[in-house]
Amino acid sequence: MQSKTFILYVRNFIFGAEDSLVSTVGLLAGVASAGIPRKDIIISGIVLIFVEAFSMAVGSFLSERTTEESLIDNQEKLGNSLIASVIMFCSYFVSGLIPLFPYLIQSNLNAFWQSIIASLVALFILGFLSAKILKTKIFKNALRMLLIGGAAIALGVIVGIIIK
């Protein structure tokens, strides 16, 4: 059986990585499909990654700290919330670079598709690895992560096309 602390850390890692992949590629694909210049797409992506990584880390810290403080017998050590928030920040930040990277080296059209494909592959791998670590159904978890994340990416593209 895995400890509550271990599960907390894994949950923050998965949440940060998944949210970053979906949010970043959704934003980038949305603004790219709206015809925004490459330089502005890159700036938007960098700002999003920094701001959201920090925001997600702060949100993780505050929610976990409040939960820890509410435990009458302090079953969980205080301080896990800080580590969990650092994990959240790092997983969000690093994962956000996956959909951004193609825009740094390619034209918008090539980067658009490479960013989406790289993010979908990363979502599938994240689902696979998280299922392996948490000992759940591997293919089901990987496919669920891919499909739900893919739907969010499609939403970003659709909104970008409509707003264009």
Image: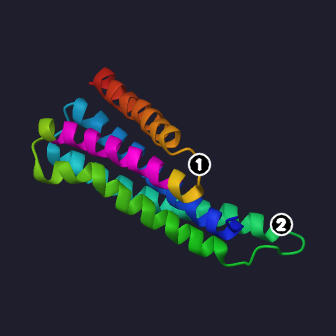
Numbered range of the magenta stretch: 111-130
Residue 134, image x, y percentages: 59, 56
Residue 51, image x, y percentages: 42, 58
Quick check: marks 1 and 2 in contact, CB under 8 Å?
no
Residue 111 lies left or right of residue 61; in this view the side is left
Residue 149, image x, y percentages: 44, 38
Q: Is residue 122 magenta?
A: yes
Quadrant in the picture for the N terminus: bottom right
Residue at the spot 16% in from the left edge and 54% down from the top edge: 104
Label 1's element? loop
Q: Quadrant of residue 118?
A: top left
Kindly report the distance in space between the C-alpha atoms of the residues bearing marks 1 and 2: 29 Å
The amino acid type of the residue labelled 1 equals: Thr
Residue 42, image x, y percentages: 22, 51
Residue 97 lies left or right of residue 14; in this view the side is left
Quadrant in the picture for the C terminus: top left
Who is closer to the viewer here, 15 or 161? 15
**Residue labelled with disc 1:** 136
